[in-house]
Image (tube, rainbow, N blue to C red):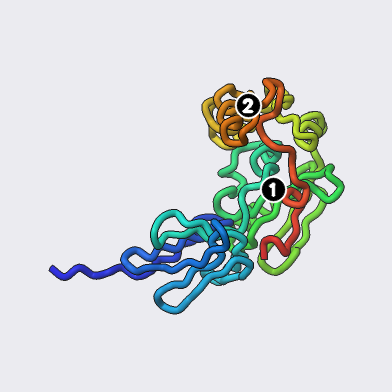
Amino acid sequence: MTETKRKTQIKIVSPLEVRVNGYDTLIQDQKFGESVMSIDLPDGRSFTVGQTSMFNKIPYKINTIEKNQTSDYTLRVANRTKSSLLLMPMFNGDKRLYMYDKLLLNCFIGKNLDTLVLVYRFSGEATFLRFESALKSFKNFILSEDPNEYCVKFEFSVPNRLLKDFDCFIEGRYSEFSTDYKMQILKFHDLDIQSQIASILFKSESRRLALNKKLGVTLDEEAELLSIIDTEKEIFNVKDYF
């Protein structure tokens, strides 16, 4: 039986990632130090850091390229923001209800560091249009706008009962979130007490020791186990995503 070689597969993994797998064909990469800066496919196509490419008519700005294994790469627009991980649970429900893995680019904080911002890839499908209407009906909804033709931005005030938790986030005092809000975060992401986020919220000894080894330091037992936010990453800039 003759074995047929599979062609290069390009697959949208999430709103932020595209996977490129060469299977039996060899994808060549160009590096700067340890960072992959571009990849060249056998069919002549190439992808470069800083370039915006269309996949299924959807634009992805390639900000990083990660090599998973030989001829297998992830093209990434961005990582999840700290706001997506730790502030988005301020909305009732769970991440599935908010199309977290389907259309959400990221959750952000507003320019004045006092509001919540959700940015989605735009979809003309009825499900998303109904979802858009639902978001606009929230009591804490402030405004929506279209930064470009490919995304839509929603801004919300912080619920009064969570203002102290929001301040803790801005100041990097994650372990000082209320116990109720910590559990709300885990429920939103469908995580348990053994998860990485839980180890940050509850300052687990295992995470502290792992960070000591990774960073070559000795962290005080009172130290937070996640760095304070970088506002440039936590405030939406359309140029970073398109």
Residue at image x 44%, y 54%? 68
Please identify the quarter of the rendering in which residue 139 is found. top right
Residue 82 lies, in percent from the top left, at: 68, 42
The residue lying toward the viewer, choosing from 200 and 89, is 200
Q: Is mark 2 on a helix, strand or loop?
A: helix
Question: In the rendered view, does 68 fall on the left or right side of 160?
Answer: left
- Horizontal side of residue 110 vs 100, given as left or right: right
**Relative height, residue 194 to residue 79 (above, below):** above
> Residue 52: x, y in percent?
61, 70
Q: Which residue is drawn at 53% across and 61% down?
A: 36
Residue 150 is labelled as none
Q: What residue type is labelled 1?
A: Cys
Cα separation, mark 1 vs mark 2, equals 19 Å
Q: Can residue 184 be seen in this view?
A: no
**Which sits in the foreground, 76 or 153?**
76
Q: Which residue lies under the disc numbered 1?
A: 107
For label 2, the residue is: 183
Q: What is the x, y in percent for residue 42? A: 40, 75
Whether residue 42 is visible to the viewer of this picture, yes or no, is yes
Q: Which residue is drawn at 59% across and 23% down?
A: 204
| Amino acid type, callout 2 | Met
